[in-house]
Image (tube, rainbow, N blue to C red):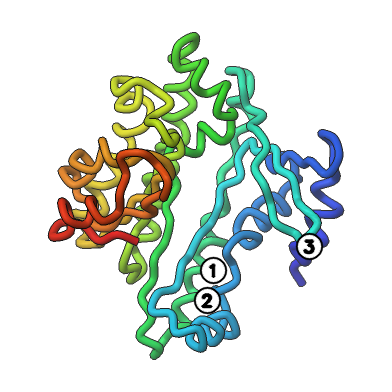
């Protein structure tokens, strides 16, 4: 019998970085991969979860498998997991790269599609991307600084991650997933954390390659971008975006009604 996720968190993710803070990459195999494949958004990967979604009137099931590489995280009093920082800040950290267990992800996908058979549910699934995984593994401040001070380290790190993300995307596309979600974590309420040139080098270039694969396979593409997204909507439409999520409220120059009026025929807003 597989161990329970809650037990894993308490026993295998023992706080070593301070009060309640854990380092997700330090769990020993096989527990590390089991936690990675089941702990987050596994709610709808069984028949009970799908029945709950039906009662709520949902049309889509959201599938997510978070690759917690290098993350320092904190679990609050009600069990929610919060990102604190990354731990893989130097080239020496590359030896600590680990990859999610594809067999466990396939098992979750198989369980999901068996559970929703006959329900007419659609499926939205996230896919990992090199820019986001490396950013969270290093920590946002370290990542941004190293794009200037040690870009060769960032590029090597991303190269190793990108190879896996392409394989993972191909695996997801073996299933009848309706919408694939990609995203960016480098947008704030005033714009991007990096220059346009660095955004292209360290994030958009990897996303473009993934987008081509998704569109070539005839799937819908959703982008998840917190912060100020208006300036890059034309670029995202050019490369094939179908859905934008979210439109963060309260940001100057980002009015959902104006965006809908301008791009409504080309873009669904979620």
Element type at marker 1?
helix
Residue at x 15%, y 43% (from the top left corner): 238
Q: Quadrant of residue 89?
A: top right
Q: Residue furthest top?
A: 149
Residue at x 65%, y 38% (from the top left corner): 71
State if disc 2 and disc 3 touch (CB < 8 Å): no
Residue 213 visible somewhere in the drawing: yes
Tell me the distance, in whole angstroms, between the alpha carbons under discs 3 and 1.
20 Å
Which disc number belongs to residue 6? 3
Q: Nearer the viewer, residue 114 or 133?
A: 133
Lower position in the chain sequence, tag 3 or tag 2: 3
State if disc 1 and disc 3 touch (CB < 8 Å): no
In-image side of 255 versus 146 (left or right): left
* Rendered location of residue 177, percent (x, y): 35, 68
Q: Quadrant of residue 158?
A: top left
State if disc 1 and disc 2 touch (CB < 8 Å): yes
Which disc number belongs to residue 37? none
In-image side of 34 versus 52 (left or right): right
| Mark 2 Cα-neighbour bin, 10 Å: few <14, some 14–19, many ≥20 | some
The residue where tag 1 is placed is 107
Residue at x 30%, y 23% (from the top left corner): 196
In-image side of 146 versus 27 (left or right): left
| Mark 3 Cα-neighbour bin, 10 Å: few <14, some 14–19, many ≥20 | few
Which disc number belongs to residue 111? 2
Element type at marker 3?
helix
* Rendered location of residue 243, percent (x, y): 28, 57
Element type at marker 2?
helix
72 in relation to 259, above or below: above
Lower position in the chain sequence, tag 3 or tag 1: 3
155 in relation to 252, above or below: above
């Amino acid at each position: 019998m597989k161990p329970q996720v809650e037990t894993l968190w308490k026993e295998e993710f023992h706080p070593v970085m301070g009060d309640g803070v854990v380092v997700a990459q330090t769990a020993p195999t096989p527990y590390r991969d089991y936690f990675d494949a089941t702990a987050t958004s596994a709610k709808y990967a069984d028949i009970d979860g799908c029945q709950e979604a039906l009662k709520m009137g949902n049309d889509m099931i959201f599938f997510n498998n978070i690759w917690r590489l290098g993350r320092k995280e904190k679990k609050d009093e009600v069990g929610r997991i919060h990102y604190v920082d990354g731990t893989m800040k130097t080239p020496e950290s590359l030896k600590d790269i680990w990859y999610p267990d594809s067999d466990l992800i396939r098992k979750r996908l198989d369980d999901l599609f068996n559970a929703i058979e006959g329900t007419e549910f659609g499926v939205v699934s996230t896919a990992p991307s090199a820019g986001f995984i490396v950013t969270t593994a290093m920590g946002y401040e370290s990542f941004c600084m190293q794009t200037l001070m040690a870009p060769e380290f960032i590029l090597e790190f991303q190269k190793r991650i990108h190879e896996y993300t392409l394989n993972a995307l191909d695996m997801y596309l073996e299933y009848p997933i309706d919408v694939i979600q990609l995203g960016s974590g480098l947008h704030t309420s005033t714009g991007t954390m990096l220059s346009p040139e660095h955004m292209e080098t360290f994030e958009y270039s990897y996303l473009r390659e993934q987008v081509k694969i998704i569109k070539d396979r005839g799937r819908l593409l959703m982008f998840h971008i917190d912060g100020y997204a208006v300036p890059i909507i034309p670029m995202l439409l050019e490369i094939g975006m179908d859905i934008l999520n979210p439109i963060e409220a309260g940001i100057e120059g980002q009015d959902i009604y104006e965006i809908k009026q301008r791009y409504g025929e080309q873009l669904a807003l979620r």
